[in-house]
Image: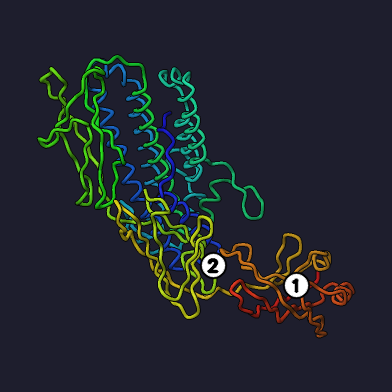
Amino acid sequence: MGGAKNCPETPRQKMIGMMYLVLTAMLALNVSADILNGFNKLRHSMESAILSTDARTEDVMRTFEAAYNKDEGSRKKYGEWYEIAIAIQTKSDEFYNYIERFKLDILNMVENAEYTSMPEEIRNGSDTNKPHQYAINERDIQTGRYHAEELRMRMDEYRIYMTSADSECVRRKMLDSKFAHDFNMKVDMFNSLFNTSDVVNEEGESIPWEQSIFEEMPAGAVFAMLTKYQNDIRTAENDIVNFMFQSAGRSDFVVNSVEALVMPINGEYIMQGGHYRARIVSAAVDTNQTPVFYINGKEYTDGIYDIVGSGVGPQTFSGYMMMPDDSTHYPFKGQYTVGAPSATISNTDLNIMYRNFKNLFSISVPGVSRDKMKVSVSAGATLSVDKNMYVIVPGDNVKEVTITVMAETDGKMVQMGNQTYRVRALPKPGAYLKSGETEYAEGNISRSALLAPNATIIASYGPDGLLDLHYQILSFKLNINGAMTECKSDKFGKMERDKLGKLKKGAMISITDVTAKGPDGKIVKLRGIPLTLN
């Protein structure tokens, strides 16, 4: 097992996690083309994240290999750790490729085709039968286990492998309290990422992990979920490889050479127009001797390399170091990345705005504090700040709002990005009779639930709704066998309760003309609640 030092989630990873949660919640609604398109976009986003993580892992492995092959002392120092890193890569590739074959098998059933790789678009992404059939009802030819069961067993095996400490060098290093702490942090993280325990559904029932993933799930959601696990595999692999390399570097060693090191002062990622600054230092020197550095023929006596980032993308530089009274050139290389201006904008309520409603936004720019940011909105909307959130309220008749983000970079304001959102009126909720924890929209109701002291008329988007907004019930009418009474609150009055208490089983009860005041200040009339006493 291995892992890197604690790696906080990037804004991109947080966005992917939030998109996944929102899209999964929307499964309770009709699976529309927009939702399926959202799952497809989520899958592509995670595929891009996988490519980025793979590139980082390969960079670390090249550095690891170079350190290992440097000389006999380095092979002894890095050997055991390097072998673990290679084994981790092999194990990760096996599990990753298994999930890829799993996805392709479902894809070819859903599309009735013979794909050898995942396509850009999936025609039958709404199919909820074939993923369930393949995963839950069909067996793996080699093992005889159901495919979903085989997937769970392989995930359990991978999790156990990634959280074990069987290697001798890891067991020795566990005596180091910092290493042990970092190791256990990785164990907790991987146990969470690859957890296959039973899941509690909305009814409070415990169901198998396989059922929660594949039962009645549309194919588009299944592919997004399986790609999410592939992304987790590559993230875990990168974490472990980094941890192995850093752990080997912290091992006891004897200085037997002089090297030059490049130490970025303000990071390896800068905005276009910003400054990249790095300190070039010697790895081992006499404190009475000062090295001299040369980059592109220019001498740097203080070891500070300062250059303005221009072109977007990866940039490299190289040079050499000389020690006093030593004609040897000690070469070094460095790299940094110049990124185009960008901003992260995420709507914490939904992916649209609502008129006359406080839409909450989290807006940030990587590497820029809030006091150096300026956020503005287009005409017809107001902007305010509440704690760490931006509050945007579109006015009447506004059809779209554009958010523009500026940030101060090297003393000047630069536009980081903008985003346009559609504006809609708040969707009308439904009327429900809530008794205890149950919400009744229609159908049968018991006498005890109907006459419960806390029985209340509420406006709600239902137990599976994506919105949870406060509506004040102003009034409603109660129709009992044709006799109508009106209540000016959200509960039955004494007269209504007396009448309800005398009803016989099978009596028809109708709650109509429900009026409610929404958070936007508008009064709406909600649908009725037809009930039958059982």
Q: Position of residue 183 (x, y in %)?
A: 47, 28
Is any atom of residue 504 visible in this view? no
The amino acid on which the numbered mark 2 sits, given as a three-letter code, is Lys
Q: CA distance from mark 1 to mark 2?
A: 25 Å
Badge 1, how many Cα within 10 Å: few under 14, some, many 20+?
A: many
Q: Position of residue 34 (x, y in %)?
A: 43, 67
340 vs 480, left or right, is left
According to the picture, the residue beneath numbered tag 1 turns out to be 490
Q: Is residue 332 above or below residue 14?
A: above
| Frontmost residue, 311 versus 274 | 274
Disc assigned to residue 358: 2
98 vs 441, left or right, is left
Q: Nearer the viewer, mark 1 or mark 2?
A: 2
Which residue is depicted at the point 49% across and 67% down? 392
Which residue is depicted at the point 65% across and 80% down? 525
User: Helix, strand or loop at disc 2?
Assistant: loop
Q: Earlier in the sequence, mark 1 or mark 2?
A: 2
| Frontmost residue, 256 versus 292 | 292
Q: Position of residue 12 (x, y in %)?
A: 39, 51
Is any atom of residue 428 visible in this view? yes
The amino acid on which the numbered mark 1 sits, given as a three-letter code, is Asp
